[in-house]
Image (cartoon, rainbow, N blue to C red):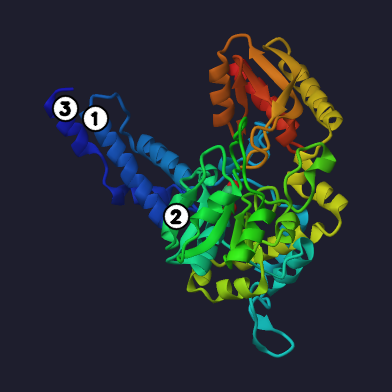
Amino acid sequence: MTPSDKHRSLKHLPGVDRLLELVKKEGRFLDIPRSVVLDSLRKALESKRKDILTDIETSTTNDAILLKAGIFVKEKTRPKLVNIINATGVVLHTNLGRALLCEDALENIRRVAQSYSNLELRIETGKRGIRYEAIDELICELTGAQSAIAVNNNAGAVLLALNTIAKDTQVVVSRGELVEIGGSFRIPDVMSKSGCILKEVGTTNRTHLRDYENAVSDNTGLFLKVHASNYKIQGFTANVALKDLVTLGKEKKIPVMEDLGSGTLIDFSKYGLPAEPTIADSVCSGADVVTFSGDKLLGGPQTGIIVGQKETIDQIKKNPLTRALRIDKLTLAALESTLKLYRDEEKAIQKIPTLRMLTMPFKDICKKADRLFKTIKEDIGTLADIDVADMNSRPGGGSFPELDLATRCIVIQPENMSVSKLEIKMRLSTPAIIGRIEDNKYILDPRTIQTNQRHIISSTLTKILVEK
Ligand SMILES: *Cc1c(COP(=O)(O)O)cnc(C)c1O
């Protein structure tokens, strides 16, 4: 287009008012808020203007502009937080929202959310109550602790506990435990934000009790142990058991805290997984304070739980930071219901999705794999080479580092499409399906695929392979 053509085209574009009139007359965008329609019309006009100026062929009829606006309206009104299908086999996937809540928790959230509740009211006296009472007793019952409180997440729990117990004092930590969890949670950074002074002892691979002992000064306020959640040091290693640190702490009158990271209430070794110290073990070792996440191995809502000696927890409750980190009633409702299930371990394993998926017997996974295989095979015919193969899944969420869980996966090799293109197309479909690529094959792990997702996966796959 010549400059004067462009000028003419731009001049002929309708104004927003004219477009609004048309929208009204033609009954378009009926249930869409006016602000969204207005913004979409402006964006559509802007886009057309840009096309003209950059010599991109474009239709500038009113219909074409309204069509374009329709795309913006759709984009603006569709939910941004959407359900996806996790076929990665990683049970606790932080990017995919970690733990799935159990039915009891969902029901309780609904019950508490739609009505007034006694969140902070003592019904018997009519006086103000304490938010954490709903779960305090239950957590103590399950862990053997004297007292408990739950805050926003475990990062918050660590920050709050450190700030309460050890502000302006030295906190002694083994070098091998100065971990980064991901999402920029690093123990040294949290330490400085909580106003504590980090005192590293030992070496990366070996730390002894005498290292802690030698580090003690007039200004030592705490011994801290941190669970090396997401990595493992192997070979020539040594670390100090919590109970030995507690003994030293008693002798030196220095409190001991453990950040368990994931934290579990059940002994996973009964289900063929490695033995992880349970929260009760840490409490029993005599730690003053133990912190752990609610949405990792516990399988509940996002929260950070602090258990310990009553005196210390009472101190924490009085810290103004507690108010800033407090959990809301929905989290409290979900947490209460999830914890209640742990009174009967068998029930917990059945009803808490995280536990169910982690402890799923291999033969059950094989059955799931077989069903998925058959469904897909029937749907796709010769469009891809498909097989099952014994592989490994990872627990994720900073639990059981380096552990491989035996699983049986569906392995797909498309005939006329690259594996990476298939992965992208599956991810961009609705709902998004997240698989993984291994050895240039597309892998679906049934461990994390939920009931009723089999047919969606199969039909999406077929559609992608047919379209190419
Ligand atoms: C995961 C983890 C945290 C952080 O917990 P969030 O609940 O994600 O805030 C802190 N410490 C350790 C050792 C962890 O594994």
Disc 2, disc 1: CB below 8 Å?
A: no
Q: Where is 428 relative to 155, above or below?
A: above
Identify the secondary structure beneath mark 3: helix
Structural crowding at the residue carrying mark 2, measured as other residues with C-alpha within 10 Å and reported as few (<14), some (14–19) or many (≥20): many
Which x, y percent locates residue 65? 35, 38
**Residue assigned mark 3:** 5
Q: Is residue 102 above or below residue 443?
A: below
Query: Residue 21, how many percent across, how many down?
Result: 35, 51
Name the amino acid type tagged 2.
Answer: Leu
Q: Nearer the viewer, residue 200 or 10?
A: 200
Report whether 144 appears left or right of 251: right
Q: How far apart are marks 3 and 1 (CA)?
A: 9 Å
Q: In which quarter of the image is residue 445?
A: top right
Q: What residue type is labelled 3?
A: Asp
Front position among marks 3 and 1: 1
Amino acid bearing label 1: Ile
Residue 405 horizontal side relative to residue 328, left or right = right
At 60% from the left and 61% from the top, the residue drawn is 256
